Amino acid sequence: MNNSPETPVTVIGLGLMGQALASAFLKAGHPTIVWNRTSSKADQLVAEGARLAPTVDDALKAGSLTIICVTDYPAMQELLGASDIELDGRTLINLTSGDSAQAREAARWAEQRGARYLDGAIMAIPSTIGTTEAVILHSGPQSDFEAHKSTVDALGTVTYLGADHGLASLYDVAGLAMMWSVLNAWLQGTALLRTAGVDAATYAPFARQIAAGVAEWLPGYAKQIDSGSFPAEVSALKTDARAMAHLIEESEAVGVNAELPKLIKAMADRSIAAGHGGEQYPVLIEEFGKPRND
Ligand SMILES: NC(=O)c1ccc[n+]([C@@H]2O[C@H](COP(=O)([O-])OP(=O)(O)OC[C@H]3O[C@@H](n4cnc5c(N)ncnc54)[C@H](OP(=O)(O)O)[C@@H]3O)[C@@H](O)[C@H]2O)c1
């Protein structure tokens, strides 16, 4: 497939993110066709050289590649479900955020209509789109990704994860879990230190160093998880659980919220009760990997 800068691209959905996507395609030299429910959001892009399609069908017909970026999957289904256009041979890349089941369902829906479908997730904010800082994840048939990679490269660091359409969404939410966990841990520590008059800015560089140090453990801990063997090379879970108790006691003593450390300690206690106290921390994957039953 010819993906030179002359390759036309359609962008449907011109919210904050869709406008940034269309703008990046324009800057890379692609003829860019846009459509949005509220057409005034296309004004700036049209001034920059985009063509506003009068209807969704016209937008879809304009070229072989369409990027969709709307609020959520129901909005996408509402929008495209109302279109009668023949999608045979066209490629849809859906960069709308959602969960893996929605992504797989959207893939089935698109494929039943003859479209090639890739699901994507944007791990970036609009201002970084078009720079290497913007990571855009894709999942679905590799050949479809390869066919359009040189076009979507205009958006940032474009990554292919695998054939399962749900993977981009799964990586997306896994990233959110990481982000919020790191931030929550930092907020817990900051709340504790503020009781002694230490401000957030003083603690931040110290916390950053700890986060970077812990990040170094991940490859070795991942090997333990993948092999299902958790020898206590550094410390045993029962030792960590005692430290968790200190964190809870300190939080309660100085009047800081102890909900989060209590939650983690409850998981560690269940794992210890199941006989894993002498193993290393990643053994907790067994608690994370199942719903709580009690
Ligand atoms: N903004 C970010 O930093 C960011 C980062 C990563 C991922 N994302 C994801 O990107 C997607 C878009 O986010 P955004 O920031 O661009 O949101 P936004 O500014 O709120 O824009 C939402 C877009 O969806 C359209 N839309 C909503 N419901 C629709 C419907 N029923 N029919 C047709 N169009 C509909 C809106 O059209 P109207 O203009 O007519 O309302 C608008 O174009 C979301 O899934 C978001 O999670 C955003």
Image (cartoon, rainbow, N blue to C red):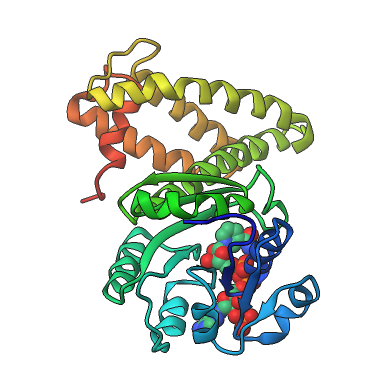
Q: Quadrant of residue 224?
A: top left
Residue under the image location 53 percent in, 85 percent down: 58
How many numbered discs? 0
Regarding ligand 1, which quadrant of the image does it lie in?
Answer: bottom right
Residue 93 in view (yes/no): yes
Q: Nearer the viewer, residue 267 or 79?
A: 79
Give the answer, above or below, for where 243 lies relative to 256: above
Residue lying at the far top in this picture: please name it. 233
Give the answer, above or below, for where 4 lies relative to 10: above
Give the answer, above or below, for where 189 lies relative to 223: below
Residue under the image location 48 percent in, 72 percent down: 72
Give how far across and how far down residue 212 sits, in percent: 59, 25
Q: Nearer the viewer, residue 227 or 106?
A: 106
Residue under the image location 28 percent in, 14 percent down: 231
Give how far across and how far down residue 253 sits, in percent: 57, 36
Q: Nearer the viewer, residue 30 or 159?
A: 30
Left or right relative to 225: residue 126: right
Left or right relative to 262: residue 46: right
Residue under the image location 34 percent in, 69 percent down: 106
Give how far across and how far down residue 78 sits, in percent: 43, 84
Give how far across and how far down residue 2 sits, in percent: 52, 56
Residue 242 in view (yes/no): no
